[in-house]
Image (cartoon, grey):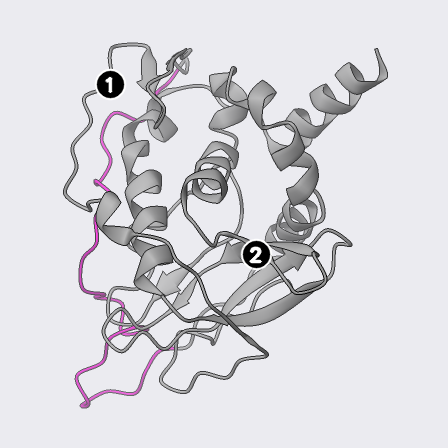
Amino acid sequence: MIKNNNSNQASLSNDRVVSVGGNADEFSLNDKVTHPQNGIILLDGTLLECFPKESPQENFQPDVIALDTTGTYLVDGTKPRKPILPPSPEEERQQKLFVENAFYLLAHRERILRDSRMFLAPVAIQSALALTGVSGFRRPTVGVYLEYWTNCLGAIQTDEQGRRSLVYYIAGSPLSGNNNCSVVGEDGETSGVTLSSFSAHWKPFVSINTRYTKAKHIYQAYTLEEVLDILHHEDED
Protein backbone atom coordinates (compact mmCIF):
# COMPACT_ATOMS: atom_id res chain seq x y z
CA MET A 1 0.00 0.00 0.00
CA ILE A 2 1.24 3.48 -0.85
CA LYS A 3 -0.71 5.31 1.80
CA ASN A 4 -2.42 4.63 5.11
CA ASN A 5 -6.15 4.84 4.46
CA ASN A 6 -6.93 4.86 8.19
CA SER A 7 -4.66 7.77 9.06
CA ASN A 8 -7.47 10.30 9.32
CA GLN A 9 -9.43 8.28 11.88
CA ALA A 10 -9.50 9.25 15.56
CA SER A 11 -6.25 7.52 16.48
CA LEU A 12 -3.22 8.79 14.63
CA SER A 13 0.16 7.09 14.64
CA ASN A 14 3.33 8.50 13.12
CA ASP A 15 6.86 7.57 12.21
CA ARG A 16 8.58 10.92 12.63
CA VAL A 17 7.87 14.59 13.18
CA VAL A 18 8.97 17.31 10.76
CA SER A 19 8.81 21.04 11.38
CA VAL A 20 7.65 23.26 8.56
CA GLY A 21 7.33 26.99 8.16
CA GLY A 22 4.66 27.38 5.53
CA ASN A 23 2.21 30.28 5.77
CA ALA A 24 -1.28 28.92 5.19
CA ASP A 25 -2.72 32.45 5.28
CA GLU A 26 -1.24 33.01 1.83
CA PHE A 27 -3.73 30.45 0.50
CA SER A 28 -7.36 31.36 1.11
CA LEU A 29 -9.98 28.63 0.75
CA ASN A 30 -12.37 31.34 -0.43
CA ASP A 31 -10.22 32.63 -3.27
CA LYS A 32 -12.14 32.68 -6.54
CA VAL A 33 -10.18 32.62 -9.78
CA THR A 34 -11.93 33.40 -13.03
CA HIS A 35 -10.17 31.44 -15.74
CA PRO A 36 -10.61 32.54 -19.35
CA GLN A 37 -12.43 30.36 -21.85
CA ASN A 38 -10.20 27.52 -23.04
CA GLY A 39 -7.48 28.39 -20.57
CA ILE A 40 -6.32 28.24 -16.96
CA ILE A 41 -4.29 30.74 -14.97
CA LEU A 42 -1.54 29.12 -12.90
CA LEU A 43 -0.41 30.39 -9.50
CA ASP A 44 2.46 32.33 -11.07
CA GLY A 45 0.09 34.08 -13.47
CA THR A 46 0.98 31.96 -16.50
CA LEU A 47 -1.95 31.45 -18.89
CA LEU A 48 -2.13 27.91 -20.25
CA GLU A 49 -4.16 27.10 -23.34
CA CYS A 50 -6.59 24.24 -22.74
CA PHE A 51 -8.32 21.88 -25.14
CA PRO A 52 -12.01 21.11 -24.58
CA LYS A 53 -13.09 17.49 -24.33
CA GLU A 54 -15.34 16.20 -27.08
CA SER A 55 -17.96 15.46 -24.42
CA PRO A 56 -17.17 17.71 -21.46
CA GLN A 57 -18.86 17.08 -18.12
CA GLU A 58 -20.72 20.36 -17.73
CA ASN A 59 -22.88 19.31 -14.77
CA PHE A 60 -20.67 18.63 -11.77
CA GLN A 61 -20.61 19.51 -8.11
CA PRO A 62 -18.04 22.13 -7.05
CA ASP A 63 -15.29 20.58 -4.95
CA VAL A 64 -15.44 22.71 -1.81
CA ILE A 65 -14.66 21.95 1.81
CA ALA A 66 -17.83 20.69 3.50
CA LEU A 67 -18.77 18.38 6.35
CA ASP A 68 -18.69 14.73 5.37
CA THR A 69 -22.07 13.11 4.79
CA THR A 70 -20.90 9.56 4.04
CA GLY A 71 -20.56 8.46 7.66
CA THR A 72 -16.88 7.70 7.13
CA TYR A 73 -15.12 10.85 8.34
CA LEU A 74 -17.87 12.37 10.49
CA VAL A 75 -20.24 10.34 12.69
CA ASP A 76 -22.94 11.50 15.12
CA GLY A 77 -22.46 8.68 17.60
CA THR A 78 -25.70 6.88 16.78
CA LYS A 79 -24.27 4.83 13.95
CA PRO A 80 -20.96 3.00 13.53
CA ARG A 81 -18.32 4.65 11.38
CA LYS A 82 -18.31 3.36 7.82
CA PRO A 83 -14.94 1.96 6.74
CA ILE A 84 -12.83 3.64 4.07
CA LEU A 85 -12.98 1.54 0.92
CA PRO A 86 -9.59 0.16 -0.12
CA PRO A 87 -8.21 1.25 -3.50
CA SER A 88 -8.75 -1.02 -6.48
CA PRO A 89 -5.76 -2.86 -8.00
CA GLU A 90 -5.66 -0.28 -10.79
CA GLU A 91 -5.76 2.60 -8.31
CA GLU A 92 -2.92 1.00 -6.36
CA ARG A 93 -0.91 0.68 -9.58
CA GLN A 94 -1.55 4.33 -10.41
CA GLN A 95 -0.58 5.42 -6.89
CA LYS A 96 2.67 3.46 -7.10
CA LEU A 97 3.46 4.89 -10.53
CA PHE A 98 3.02 8.45 -9.29
CA VAL A 99 4.98 8.01 -6.08
CA GLU A 100 7.87 6.25 -7.81
CA ASN A 101 8.12 9.07 -10.35
CA ALA A 102 7.42 12.02 -8.04
CA PHE A 103 10.95 13.42 -8.18
CA TYR A 104 11.16 12.78 -11.93
CA LEU A 105 8.00 14.82 -12.43
CA LEU A 106 9.35 17.57 -10.18
CA ALA A 107 12.56 17.69 -12.21
CA HIS A 108 10.43 18.28 -15.34
CA ARG A 109 8.26 20.91 -13.70
CA GLU A 110 8.91 23.64 -16.26
CA ARG A 111 7.98 21.35 -19.15
CA ILE A 112 4.79 20.12 -17.49
CA LEU A 113 3.67 23.64 -16.59
CA ARG A 114 3.78 24.55 -20.29
CA ASP A 115 1.21 21.92 -21.31
CA SER A 116 -2.29 21.92 -19.84
CA ARG A 117 -2.81 18.28 -20.76
CA MET A 118 0.19 17.33 -18.64
CA PHE A 119 -0.84 19.72 -15.89
CA LEU A 120 -4.32 18.20 -15.70
CA ALA A 121 -3.16 14.57 -15.77
CA PRO A 122 -5.01 12.85 -12.89
CA VAL A 123 -3.24 11.43 -9.84
CA ALA A 124 -4.80 8.52 -7.92
CA ILE A 125 -3.75 9.66 -4.45
CA GLN A 126 -6.78 10.49 -2.28
CA SER A 127 -6.05 12.66 0.73
CA ALA A 128 -8.71 13.45 3.33
CA LEU A 129 -9.46 15.23 6.60
CA ALA A 130 -11.42 14.22 9.67
CA LEU A 131 -14.88 15.83 9.65
CA THR A 132 -14.76 16.98 6.02
CA GLY A 133 -13.48 13.82 4.32
CA VAL A 134 -12.25 14.01 0.75
CA SER A 135 -13.96 17.32 -0.04
CA GLY A 136 -11.43 19.73 -1.50
CA PHE A 137 -9.02 16.88 -2.25
CA ARG A 138 -10.90 15.23 -5.10
CA ARG A 139 -9.21 14.48 -8.43
CA PRO A 140 -5.74 15.98 -7.79
CA THR A 141 -3.51 16.37 -10.84
CA VAL A 142 0.18 16.34 -11.63
CA GLY A 143 0.12 20.12 -11.92
CA VAL A 144 -1.61 20.53 -8.57
CA TYR A 145 1.16 18.55 -6.89
CA LEU A 146 3.87 20.52 -8.67
CA GLU A 147 2.36 23.82 -7.54
CA TYR A 148 1.94 22.48 -4.01
CA TRP A 149 5.52 21.25 -3.81
CA THR A 150 7.00 24.48 -5.15
CA ASN A 151 4.74 27.00 -3.40
CA CYS A 152 4.11 25.45 0.02
CA LEU A 153 7.09 25.79 2.34
CA GLY A 154 7.72 22.35 3.85
CA ALA A 155 6.11 20.33 1.06
CA ILE A 156 9.68 19.47 0.07
CA GLN A 157 11.40 18.15 3.19
CA THR A 158 15.17 18.05 3.76
CA ASP A 159 16.62 16.05 6.66
CA GLU A 160 19.87 16.58 8.55
CA GLN A 161 21.76 14.50 6.00
CA GLY A 162 20.50 16.66 3.14
CA ARG A 163 18.14 13.99 1.81
CA ARG A 164 14.98 15.34 0.26
CA SER A 165 11.46 13.96 0.41
CA LEU A 166 8.09 15.08 -0.95
CA VAL A 167 4.80 15.18 0.94
CA TYR A 168 2.32 13.34 -1.25
CA TYR A 169 -0.50 12.22 1.08
CA ILE A 170 -2.30 14.48 3.55
CA ALA A 171 -4.55 13.20 6.33
CA GLY A 172 -5.48 14.44 9.77
CA SER A 173 -7.72 16.68 11.82
CA PRO A 174 -8.15 20.32 10.79
CA LEU A 175 -9.20 21.13 14.37
CA SER A 176 -6.54 19.47 16.53
CA GLY A 177 -3.80 19.42 13.92
CA ASN A 178 -3.12 15.75 14.62
CA ASN A 179 -2.05 14.18 11.35
CA ASN A 180 -0.44 11.21 9.71
CA CYS A 181 0.82 12.16 6.27
CA SER A 182 3.17 10.38 3.88
CA VAL A 183 6.37 11.34 2.11
CA VAL A 184 8.53 9.76 -0.59
CA GLY A 185 12.29 10.13 -0.70
CA GLU A 186 14.54 10.50 -3.70
CA ASP A 187 15.29 6.78 -3.39
CA GLY A 188 11.59 6.00 -3.84
CA GLU A 189 11.11 4.87 -0.26
CA THR A 190 7.89 6.02 1.43
CA SER A 191 7.29 6.68 5.11
CA GLY A 192 4.76 8.21 7.47
CA VAL A 193 5.33 11.70 8.81
CA THR A 194 3.60 13.97 11.30
CA LEU A 195 3.76 17.59 10.18
CA SER A 196 4.06 20.10 13.00
CA SER A 197 2.11 22.77 11.12
CA PHE A 198 -0.71 20.80 9.53
CA SER A 199 -2.83 23.73 8.36
CA ALA A 200 0.18 25.05 6.43
CA HIS A 201 -0.17 21.96 4.24
CA TRP A 202 -3.81 21.02 3.87
CA LYS A 203 -5.03 24.58 3.25
CA PRO A 204 -2.59 25.30 0.38
CA PHE A 205 -3.24 21.90 -1.19
CA VAL A 206 -7.01 22.35 -1.10
CA SER A 207 -6.74 25.92 -2.37
CA ILE A 208 -4.60 24.84 -5.33
CA ASN A 209 -6.64 21.72 -6.07
CA THR A 210 -10.02 23.46 -6.08
CA ARG A 211 -8.62 26.25 -8.26
CA TYR A 212 -8.84 23.87 -11.23
CA THR A 213 -12.04 21.93 -10.43
CA LYS A 214 -13.92 22.99 -13.55
CA ALA A 215 -10.88 22.55 -15.78
CA LYS A 216 -10.55 18.90 -14.70
CA HIS A 217 -14.05 18.21 -15.98
CA ILE A 218 -14.13 20.09 -19.27
CA TYR A 219 -10.58 20.01 -20.67
CA GLN A 220 -8.47 17.24 -22.13
CA ALA A 221 -5.79 15.63 -19.99
CA TYR A 222 -3.11 13.04 -20.58
CA THR A 223 -2.92 9.98 -18.39
CA LEU A 224 0.03 9.74 -16.04
CA GLU A 225 1.50 7.06 -18.28
CA GLU A 226 1.26 9.38 -21.29
CA VAL A 227 2.96 12.19 -19.39
CA LEU A 228 5.85 9.91 -18.42
CA ASP A 229 6.14 8.49 -21.94
CA ILE A 230 6.36 11.98 -23.46
CA LEU A 231 8.97 13.11 -20.95
CA HIS A 232 11.08 9.97 -21.39
CA HIS A 233 10.90 10.34 -25.18
CA GLU A 234 11.98 13.99 -24.99
CA ASP A 235 14.82 13.08 -22.63
CA GLU A 236 16.12 10.61 -25.19
CA ASP A 237 16.13 13.13 -28.06
**Mark 2 highlights which residue?**
157
Residue 7 versus residue 193: which sits nearer the camera? Answer: 193
Q: Secondary structure at mark 2?
A: strand
**Where residue 51 appears, x then y in whole percent?**
42, 11
Residue at 67% from the left image edge and 42% from the top image edge: 103
Residue 63 image label: none
Q: Looking at the picture, how far across and down is residue 82, in whole percent?
A: 35, 78
| Horizontal side of residue 84 vs 76, given as left or right | right
In the picture provided, is 218 more to the left or to the right than 34? right
Quarter of the image with the C terminus in it:
top right
In which image quadrant can residue 178 be found?
Answer: bottom left
Q: Quadrant of residue 41?
A: top left
Determine if the magenta segment contains residue 56: yes
| Residue 35 image label | 1
For mark 1, does the 10 Å Cα neighbourhood hold few (<14), some (14 to 19), or many (20 or more) residues?
A: some
Q: Give the magenta part as a residue range.
A: 55-82
Q: Is residue 187 magenta?
A: no
Tell me the quarter of the picture where residue 214 sits: top left
Secondary element at image label 1: loop
Residue 68 at x, y percent in the picture: 23, 65
Q: How busy is the neighbourhood of tag 2: few (under 14 within 10 Å), some, or many (20 plus)?
A: some
Q: Residue type at mark 1?
A: His
Q: Between residues 205 and 229, which one lies in front from this camera angle?
A: 205
